[in-house]
Image (cartoon, rainbow, N blue to C red):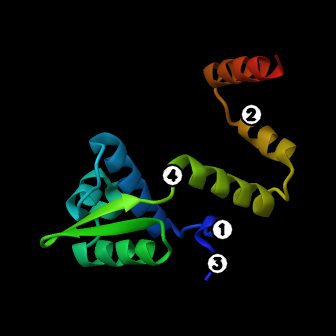
Amino acid sequence: MKPYEEIILPESELETMNAIWAAEEALDRPIYTRDIMEYGTDYLLGLKMTTVLTLVSRLLYKQFIRIQKVGRSNFYTATVKHADYQKRAYRNFLEGTFRSDRRDLAALLIADLSGEELAKAREIVTAAEK
């Protein structure tokens, strides 16, 4: 298996991690399985609890989360920060889909912006140039 620093999660596991990151941010504590369901999207809500537990076990195996058993309850804590994973996924997407050509990606994104979003993007570019 690849080191967890190189792993890009499949959609089902990413949805589970997104719920974990959201629950941790909102609750500021390790989370229970029910928290994962509460902070999950409709995708997770449509799954059976046993399926969610399978996804959690895959994330444990891949070292994206750790478990702490307290009595009969399991607490989960993310070991990978959301921002770190976003950077990794961005690099993977850029290298794979755009062959590392940021200009092609930027052109695609700019073409999809509304007028308000384009004005905000200009502000970001102007600030970055300074």
Label 2 crowd bin: few (<14), some (14–19), many (20+), radius 10 Å:
few
Q: CA gap, disc 1 to disc 2?
A: 29 Å
| Residue at 24% over, 73% down | 48
Tell me the amino acid under the disc marked 2: Ile
Which of the two discs, 2 and 4, labels the residue nearer the N terminus?
Answer: 4
Report the residue marked by disc 2. 110
Which dot, 1 or 2, sits closer to the camera?
Answer: 1
Q: CA gap, disc 4 to disc 1?
A: 14 Å
Report the residue marked by disc 4. 81
Which of the two discs, 3 and 4, labels the residue nearer the N terminus?
Answer: 3
Describe residue 105's horizontal placement relative to residue 120 as left or right. Answer: right
Q: Which mark is residue 82?
A: none
Report the residue marked by disc 1. 6
Q: Which mark is residue 2?
A: 3
| Residue at 62% over, 19% down | 116
Which of the two discs, 2 and 3, labels the residue nearer the N terminus?
Answer: 3
Q: CA gap, disc 1 to disc 3?
A: 6 Å
